[in-house]
């Protein structure tokens, strides 16, 4: 049996976030790019109605895991970049003012 209507991406995200079981991903080597690619293929399969009702819960559960993984990876990367920029600012030499030079 096929799904009658394709889920919109926001509907899938809502479903993944609030309905799917919260189960940690198995320990696997996964990059952001491969996780995002797999997530896109799941969304496309659901949009194209090529996922049966029997497979839908499994696909949505996996999508939920991938969304959590990607979100964490983005947050971690943002924190790392912010830290690096902050460290660069702390290490950069401060401009020296010459005698008689006023900032205004």
Image (spheres, rainbow, N blue to C red):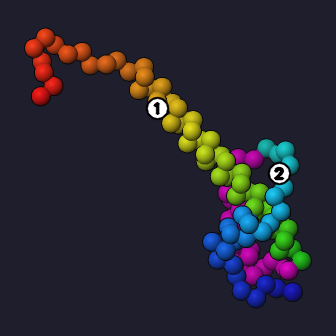
The magenta region covers 30-53
Residue under the image location 83 percent in, 62 percent down: 21
Mark 2 is surrounded, within 10 Å at the Cα level, by few (under 14), some (14 to 19) or many (20 or more) other residues, namely few
Q: In the rendered view, does 77 fall on the left or right side of 63?
A: left
Vertical side of 74 occupied by 84: above or below: above
The label number, if any, that marks residue 24 in the structure image: 2
Q: Quadrant of the N terminus?
A: bottom right
Q: Quadrant of residue 101?
A: top left
Q: Quadrant of residue 9?
A: bottom right
Front residue (pair 103, 53): 103
Q: Quadrant of the C terminus?
A: top left
Q: Is residue 33 visible?
A: no
How far across and how far down the image is residue 20, in percent?
A: 80, 66
How far across and how far down the image is residue 37, in percent?
A: 68, 59
Residue under the image location 46 percent in, 30 percent down: 86
Magenta stretch: helix, strand or loop mostly: helix
- The residue identified by callout 1 is 85
């Amino acid at each position: 049996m096929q799904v009658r209507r394709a889920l919109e991406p926001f509907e899938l995200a809502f479903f993944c976030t609030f309905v799917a079981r919260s189960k940690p991903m198995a320990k696997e080597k996964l990059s952001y790019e491969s996780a995002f690619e797999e997530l896109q293929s799941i969304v496309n399969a659901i949009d194209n109605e090529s996922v049966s009702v029997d497979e839908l819960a499994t696909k949505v559960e996996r999508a939920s895991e991938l969304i959590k993984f990607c979100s964490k990876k983005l947050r971690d990367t943002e924190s790392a970049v912010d830290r690096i920029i902050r460290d660069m600012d702390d290490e950069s030499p401060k401009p020296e003012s010459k005698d008689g030079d006023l900032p205004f």
